[in-house]
Image (tube, grey):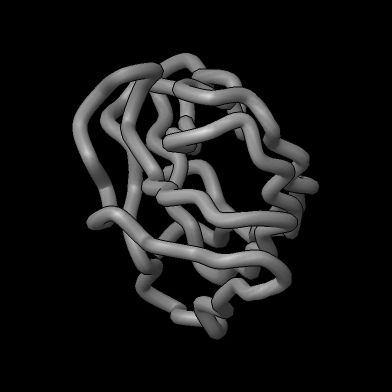
Amino acid sequence: GTLLTPKFVIIDAATNGDNTILAAVTSKKIRVLAAFLVAAGTVNCRFESGAGGTALTGQMNLVANTGFVLPFSPVGWFETASNTLLNLELSAGVSVDGSLVYVEV
């Protein structure tokens, strides 16, 4: 198989609606291998393939100072469609911060 280099990105979202986490990569999908998020207040969030796009996760309901961890998965947790950005949709303008590890496939 082809070796893939893991990459890292900071999550710093606070806009009600669409928050671009990673820009689209030409002819590639973005596959998330690990992540963590923490919310400053009550908010629902979900990862999407594209802004306002296809849901990659269900709605995750967070309250102030809570979050979650997706531990490392060698096969990944989810991935975008080819040529499509990774989006974090928020139900309110609440600060949601964290980090994720991904590969381009």
Q: Is residue 6 visible?
A: no
Q: Which of these two is toward me, 65 or 67?
A: 65
Q: Which of these two is toward me, 26 or 60?
A: 60
Q: Which of these two is toward me, 47 or 66?
A: 66
11, above or below 42, in the image? above
Q: Quadrant of the N terminus?
A: bottom left
Give the left or right position of residue 28, taking residue 40 as reference: left
Q: Is residue 34 visible?
A: yes
Q: Residue 28 lies in what quarter of the image?
A: top left
Residue in the image at 47% along x and 15% along y: 26
Q: Residue 48 lies in what quarter of the image?
A: top left
Give the left or right position of residue 38, taking residue 70 as reference: right
State the count of labels: 0
Q: Which of these two is toward me, 30 or 50?
A: 50
Residue in the image at 36% along x and 22% along y: 50
Residue in the image at 72% along x and 71% along y: 65
> In the image, residue 7 lies at what x, y percent?
72, 52
Q: Residue 80 lies in what quarter of the image?
A: top left
> In the image, residue 91 lies at what x, y percent?
43, 36
Residue in the image at 52% along x and 34% along y: 92
38, above or below 44, in the image? below
> In the image, residue 73 lies at what x, y percent?
45, 80
> In the image, residue 96 lies at what x, y percent?
68, 49
Q: Quadrant of the C terminus?
A: top left
